[in-house]
Image: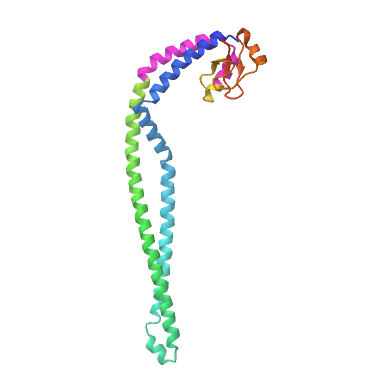
Amino acid sequence: MNLEKLLEYQTEDTKLRKIEEEIKSSDEYKKYAQANRFMGGAQEKLESIDRRAGELKALLEEINRRDEEITNEIADYNGLEELIKDGGDISYYEKTVRALSDRLRALKGELNKLTSEIRAAGEEYKKFREQTIAMQKQRKEYKEKYEEIRAARAGDADKIKKNLEAIAKNIPANILEKYAAKSKERIFPILVPLTNGSCVCGMNFPLAQRSTLSGGNVIECEHCHRFVYNK
């Protein structure tokens, strides 16, 4: 392994990463990313609100149906005197009417609760719609600002990328593949010096393993998966 070239590659890569980190730490990028995240989940949220609205509508129709049914049953007992004259049991009729009235009152309570839920769902939809419009504007505005920042740093980034390409020509392809794979795993820095017989993560290497570091060789740390080299 050409350790010197690989360390040089990592030095340039560090510079490129710093530029990316500076861009992503800007308020412009953060607000653009925030709007992107919001808009990414907006469709799912709208579908959820629509489903809930459909459920509430179905419940309202069912309660209204039951309300009409009970009201009609109570209306059947409006001619109570006639029923008694015909030999009906007044206590039975009164008990039945009371039971129906209790059911109707309970149903009215359900209706009031449902009406509150429908009102809340409507307010939620209105608020979310306003947020969506605001986030659409924010995404458009801050995407332009974010792209301006990227464009301003493009020259520096391109110069570093050209340096990386030049250095890469002196590094075996399989080593670069491993480097890229570790980079994707958010391992950085990838190459670290052996310090007091240990990796930067604290993993200690036995003497026999350390002896293999001569001649520019590296050891892959079993704990943090970095490449460890000897200065």
Q: Is residue 12 left or right of residue 126?
A: right
State the residue lying farthest toward the front: 196
Q: Which residue is drawn at the image coordinates 44% and 56% (left, top)?
A: 55
Counting labels gives 0
List x then y, in percent, for residue 98. 41, 78
Q: In the rendered view, would you say 219 is above or below 99?
A: above
Quadrant that contains the N terminus: top right
Q: In the rendered view, would you say 152 is above or below 58?
A: above
Q: In the rendered view, would you say 13 is above or below 127?
A: above
Most foreground residue, 157 or 53: 157
Identify the image quadrant of residue 197.
Answer: top right
The image's colouring method is: rainbow
Q: In the rendered view, would you say 173 is above or below 100?
A: above
Residue 177 belongs to magenta span: yes
List x then y, in percent, for residue 21. 42, 22
Quadrant that contains the C terminus: top right
Q: Is residue 29 left or right of residue 202?
A: left
List x then y, in percent, for residue 14. 46, 16
Identify the image quadrant of residue 156.
Answer: top left
Identify the image quadrant of residue 217.
Answer: top right
List x then y, in percent, for residue 18. 42, 19
What span is in magenta? 151-180
Residue 7 belongs to magenta span: no
Q: Which residue is drawn at the image coordinates 44% and 92% (left, top)?
A: 87
Instruction: Tell me, yes or no, if residue 161 can be seen here.
Output: yes
Instruction: Tell me, yes or no, if residue 169 can be seen here.
Output: no
Most foreground residue, 62 or 117: 117
Q: Which residue is drawn at the image coordinates 41% and 90% (left, top)?
A: 84
Secondary structure mostly taken by the magenta-highlighted segment of the chain: helix
